[in-house]
Image: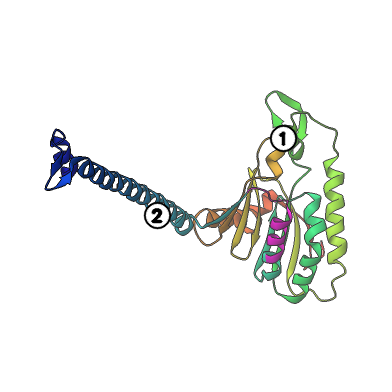
């Protein structure tokens, strides 16, 4: 920059130190332009590195403190189902499906449940939101609604005449029929109707929690899914909450055991 300014100050003369002034100006201008370009590149690289470090620190913090492993945007696609199946096949301590009362669970994973319960001392619990639990509101003190029907209204806005009691009973019968074919049950298999009101469903496989918030609209069953570590952060809280619901002192009030492989209810 100094050379450029000095050369510009001699613009009225033809040469300086035997070199034409226009050459001084051209060389100095090129050096100055190259310096400014290098400076901008350096600043951009610094900002990019800072952004990358910020993201890494942020996500590492989320992982360390809250145990969040993945956020899945489509839980019904092949990749997600394969992830469930992979985690389920490796489960040895527990496999708890909470509020996953759709037909996909019965179709996709029952055979794996059967294999696990015959080969490992694992606790398998399939929890359905009870179709017999009724919702009583101030505006409808007489016309009580099934809790599942209320969720259906939140998602679709239009009430239907769906017979949830029959549908859920059919899915439970399918599960019981498959488990009834087991030759040697090493673990424990329970089907439970739960009346506890929550705003999420989850799939707990050993120390991993797949956490499904209930949302309004067609994406309610699609996204998001949060995969968490069950030993810390939000995953631990979900795990403790579900454990208290199905195994704690409150469970006798909120839960109805439909089937228990130990007692063959």
For disc 2, the marked residue is 53
- Left or right placement of residue 57 versus residue 113 in this view: left
Q: Distance between the residues labelled 1 and 2?
A: 40 Å
Identify which residue is drawn at 73% across, 51% down.
Answer: 76
- Residue 80 in magenta? yes
Q: What is the crowding at mark 2: few (fewer than 14 residues within 10 Å), some, or many (at least 20)?
A: few
The answer to whether residue 239 of the structure is visible from this angle is: yes
Q: Residue 155 carries which label?
A: 1
Instruction: Identify the residue at the far top of this view.
Output: 139
- Residue 40 in magenta? no
* In this view, the mark in front (1 or 2): 2
**Quadrant of image for the C terminus:** bottom right
Q: Which of 98 and 69 is in front in this view?
A: 69
Query: How many numbered markers are drawn?
Result: 2
- Left or right placement of residue 74 versus residue 58 in this view: right
Identify which residue is drawn at 73% across, 71% down.
Answer: 187
Against 223, residue 121 (above or below) is: below
x and y, in percent, of residue 169 in the image: 85, 50
Instruction: Identify the residue at the far left of this view.
Output: 17
x and y, in percent, of residue 196 in the image: 66, 45
**Quadrant of image for the N terminus:** top left
- Left or right placement of residue 184 versus residue 202 in this view: right
Tell me the quarter of the picture where residue 181 sits.
bottom right
Q: Which of 175 and 6 is in front in this view?
A: 6
Circle 1 SS class: helix
Circle 2 SS class: helix
x and y, in percent, of residue 110 in the image: 80, 62
Disc 1 + disc 2, Cβ < 8 Å: no
Q: Give the range drawn in magenta.
A: 73-86
């Amino acid at each position: 920059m100094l050379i450029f300014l000095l050369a510009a100050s001699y613009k009225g003369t033809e040469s300086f130190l035997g070199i034409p002034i226009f050459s001084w100006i051209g060389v100095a201008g090129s050096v100055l332009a190259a310096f400014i370009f290098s400076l901008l590149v350096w600043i951009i690289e610094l900002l990019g590195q800072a952004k990358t470090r910020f993201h890494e620190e942020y996500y590492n913090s989320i992982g360390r403190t809250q145990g969040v492993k993945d956020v899945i945007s489509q839980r019904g696609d092949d990749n997600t189902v394969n992830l469930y199946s992979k985690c389920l096949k490796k489960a040895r301590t527990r496999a708890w499906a909470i509020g996953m009362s759709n037909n996909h669970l019965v179709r996709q994973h029952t055979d794996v449940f059967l294999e696990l319960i015959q080969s490992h001392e694992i606790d398998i619990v399939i929890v359905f939101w009870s179709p017999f639990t009724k919702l009583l509101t101030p505006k409808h003190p007489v016309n009580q609604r099934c809790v599942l029907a209320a969720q259906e209204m939140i998602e679709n806005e239009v009430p239907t005449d769906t017979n949830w009691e029959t549908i859920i009973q059919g899915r439970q019968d399918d599960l019981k029929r498959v488990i009834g074919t087991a030759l040697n049950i090493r673990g424990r298999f329970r089907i439970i109707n739960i009346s506890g009101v929550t705003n999420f469903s989850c799939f707990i496989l050993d120390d991993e929690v797949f956490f499904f918030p209930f949302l309004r609209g067609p994406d309610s069953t699609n996204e998001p899914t949060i995969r968490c570590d069950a030993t810390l952060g939000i995953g631990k809280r979900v795990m403790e909450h579900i454990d208290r619901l199905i195994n704690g002192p409150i469970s006798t009030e909120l839960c109805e055991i439909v089937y228990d492989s130990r007692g063959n209810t």
